[in-house]
Image (cartoon, rainbow, N blue to C red):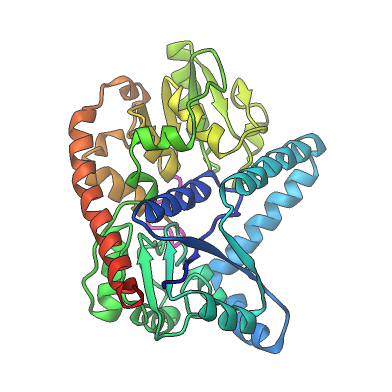
Amino acid sequence: MIKKIGLSVCYDTKNFGSQLQVLATINKIEQLGYKTEIIRYKKKLSLKFIYQTLPRFLNGYFIDAKINRKKKKKELNKHPEIYENVKIRNKRFDKFVEKNFTNLSENYCGWDELVHKSNENYDVFLCGSDQLWLPGNLGSHFYTLEYANNKKKKIAYATSFGVSQIPWYQKARTKKYLNEFSFLSCREEKGTKIIKELTGKEVPVVVDPTLLLSKEEWENLIPVDKVLEEKYIFCYLLGGNVEHRKIAEELSKNTGYKIVTIPFLDNYVEYDENFGDYRMYDVDSSDFVNLIRNAEYVLTDSFHGSIFSIINHKKFVTLNRFLEGSKNSRNSRIDNLCSMLELNDRRYSDDILKIKNDIDYDKVDILLNDIKIKSIKYLEQALKKSTEEFL
């Protein structure tokens, strides 16, 4: 009998998109007839851990992320009221995990226990989706499935590098772990080009797991509910660009609709202390979906903010969170999404009032359905071929 499929996924982060894509991944795999278990790895200080981790402190991407987190925490500590509100939201994130992710493994403490027990407990390993292969994550060796025995099948579903190119000093290690996968797929065209460059393999582009589920399936998972009764613009901005806030204010002034925000998620932005008519803290990933469902307009710089706008047929505009050409730019995933669904006109140019233009969602749904079918077929075949020897 086949054992559970072990999942290396980012489920317990304080991020709506990450939680929702894990929920979708589990739901779709179990729809296909397989059992899943989220692998929990608790790092343990040891000589091996130090040896594995040390290179991360020479990794510019990892250091930048650490600095940003410390900077945010330092700023929030200066504002006790905001800090307490963020704690309320973090508790809601944790409760969403408790409610929705009951298929958790025991805590595997330390690398040796992770290697030993996971290879005993699972015959197939899957990582995805999200930006698990960001250059800053390489040093953890977890989302690359390097802990899994190479005799076991390894699947990557829609896993993203998050960047357009791999730093030269990581190319050899990236090539090594990629070659150990039995089935590879990426969420963006640029990811497939990276894999082609490093391994010579042609791999498919598949949709983010959240797009594998229909609007109706999402309504079964997350019931429709009104977080607010009045009409509003949902302004979901993770970046720190103040001009983007002013664009939202322009739209609010033109339409008369109030602005709803969820501030201080990725960054502390001073402008956000007074930006928006409703600043939401006591919300979880279900509320995030419902805030999009019931919005008149959605203005976002978020990948999953864009995705759930599309699923729910909303009028939306997506702004660039990152400067083009920046080494930290992650705009390619939104570029790919809009190009794939012929929604390039929903990228902000210079006129926010274009958000009022109708979107031909009949056409969008046809395009989405085509790539969704191909994506499900890839996942289904990867799981079947990985598990058939155990049936």
Q: Name the image quarter holding residue 320.
A: top left
Count of numbered labels shown in the rendering? 0
Q: Is residue 8 above or below residue 152?
A: above
- Residue 47 placement (x, y as % from top left): 70, 89
Q: Is residue 323 magenta?
A: yes
Q: Quadrant of the C terminus?
A: bottom left
67 or 146: nearer the viewer: 146
Q: In this rendering, is residue 241 above or below 47?
A: above
Q: Quadrant of the N terminus?
A: bottom left
| Identity of the residue drawn at 19% across and 41% down | 367
Residue 321 position by quadrant: top left
Magenta span has 168? Answer: no
Quadrant in which residue 63 is drawn: bottom right
Residue 54 visible in the shown view: no
Residue 239 x/y as whole percent? 52, 44
Front in this rendered view, residue 5 or 13: 5
Q: Residue at x 40, y 81 (%)?
A: 152
Drawn side of residue 182 relative to residue 100, left or right: left
Q: Could you tell whether 341 is left or right of 282 in the image?
A: left
Q: Position of residue 260 (x, y in %)?
A: 55, 25
**Dominant secondary structure of the magenta stretch?**
loop
Residue 58 percent location from the top left of the image? 58, 78
Q: 33 or 100, which lies in front?
A: 33
Q: What range is drawn magenta here? A: 321-328
Can the viewer see residue 41?
Answer: yes
